[in-house]
């Protein structure tokens, strides 16, 4: 009877799952839950609240928040056209998240690929790629985006393209630095001796070692790109009405800051909370993906009690 209750050696030393590691960091857990809520808003918000977010009601212009007699959609107040701020925040989440996601994805793929090539190719090819990164980095990213968007139509696709281009050097330089160190390890040398091609070594042996670092950077970069999009929308060269983003909502509420602070406060709060959650989740990812730091979560009391 006692033997059936005693855990086996494999069960005793088996590493905890991702959920247990996440639960061990309470701040990361709260951040992950909030980000899931934001993703749900981005997916379902427009289909559920698109009509309500664009419905004009001049009787409710600049309605103050927490006026419960006007319905739950007006709990955060209304904008200068009487449209419920809560509905507009839910709808704007899709454009804000879509722009940030595809900009980070494109920058990660292009920058990561170029970094792999620059780190494992001949010096001439590496120098050409790095000079390309230097050219992009010589311009302030926000200034470059402003110049390009003034020349192009400020559409969603152009906004993604501009933001992705400005972030490519981050992934390129990081990936190249990682590859230069990994290429000297024994398993890479063994693959060379066994006759593996350059492409096989690069994408099947080195890339999996670089991905954890790129994933951590992408989480942080997602927050940066979202702030950059909000800045461009605030300047009036981002997404244009009738489309809406959180940054555009902040810009539209700027003329009414003195008498209707809530027009800019609530979308600005969503930007701050989302950025903070991404930073907390990025710190957790960096700890989990680093074998030298992962013990901090694996050995915590919270993990042991789950």
Image (cartoon, rainbow, N blue to C red):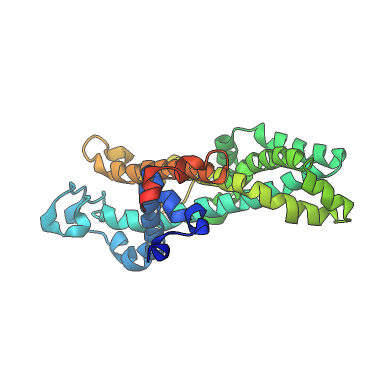
Query: Residue at image x 88%, y 51%?
Result: 193
Residue 98: give x, y in percent of width and height.
49, 56
- Looking at the image, which is closer to me, 289 or 113? 289
Q: Residue at x 27, y 39 (%)?
A: 256
In the image, 218 versus 258, the foreground residue is: 218
Number of marks in the image? 0
In the figure, 128 relative to 81: above or below?
Answer: above
Q: Could one spot residue 104 in this view of the protein? A: yes
In the displayed structure image, the side of residue 78 where residue 275 appears, left or right? right
Q: Residue at x 67, y 48 (%)?
A: 209
Residue 31: give x, y in percent of width and height. 38, 47
Horizontally, is 233 left or right of 208 in the view? left
Outermost residue toward the left in this view: 69
Q: 106 or 296: nearer the eye? A: 296
Task: Give residue 277's position: percent from left, percent from top.
Answer: 40, 44
In this rendering, does residue 31 appear at all? no
């Amino acid at each position: 009877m006692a033997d059936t209750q005693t855990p086996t050696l494999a069960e005793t030393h088996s590493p905890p799952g991702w959920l247990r590691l996440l639960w061990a960091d309470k701040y990361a857990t709260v951040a992950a839950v909030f980000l899931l809520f934001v993703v749900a808003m981005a997916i379902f918000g427009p289909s559920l609240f698109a009509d309500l977010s664009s419905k004009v009601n001049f009787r409710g212009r600049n309605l103050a928040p927490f006026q419960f007699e006007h319905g739950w959609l007006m709990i955060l107040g209304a904008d200068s056209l009487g449209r419920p701020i809560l509905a507009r925040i839910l709808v704007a989440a899709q454009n804000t998240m879509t722009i940030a996601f595809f900009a980070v994805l494109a920058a990660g793929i292009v920058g990561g690929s170029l970094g792999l090539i620059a780190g494992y190719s001949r010096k001439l090819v590496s120098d050409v790629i790095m000079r390309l990164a230097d050219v992009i980095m010589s311009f302030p990213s926000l200034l470059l985006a402003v110049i390009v968007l003034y020349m192009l139509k400020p559409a969603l696709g152009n906004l993604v393209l501009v933001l992705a281009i400005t972030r490519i050097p981050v992934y390129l330089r990081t990936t190249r630095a990682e590859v230069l160190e990994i290429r000297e390890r024994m398993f890479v040398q063994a693959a060379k001796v066994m006759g593996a091609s350059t492409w096989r070594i690069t994408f099947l042996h080195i890339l999996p070692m670089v991905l954890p670092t790129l994933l951590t950077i992408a989480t942080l970069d997602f927050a940066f790109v979202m702030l950059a999009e909000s800045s461009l929308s605030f300047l009036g060269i981002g997404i244009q009405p009738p489309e809406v983003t959180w940054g555009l909502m902040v810009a539209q509420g700027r003329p009414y800051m003195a008498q209707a602070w809530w027009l800019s406060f609530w979308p600005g709060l969503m930007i701050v909370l989302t950025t903070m959650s991404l930073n907390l989740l990025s710190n957790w990812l960096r700890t989990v993906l680093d074998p030298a730091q992962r013990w901090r979560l694996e050995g915590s009391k919270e993990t042991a009690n789950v």
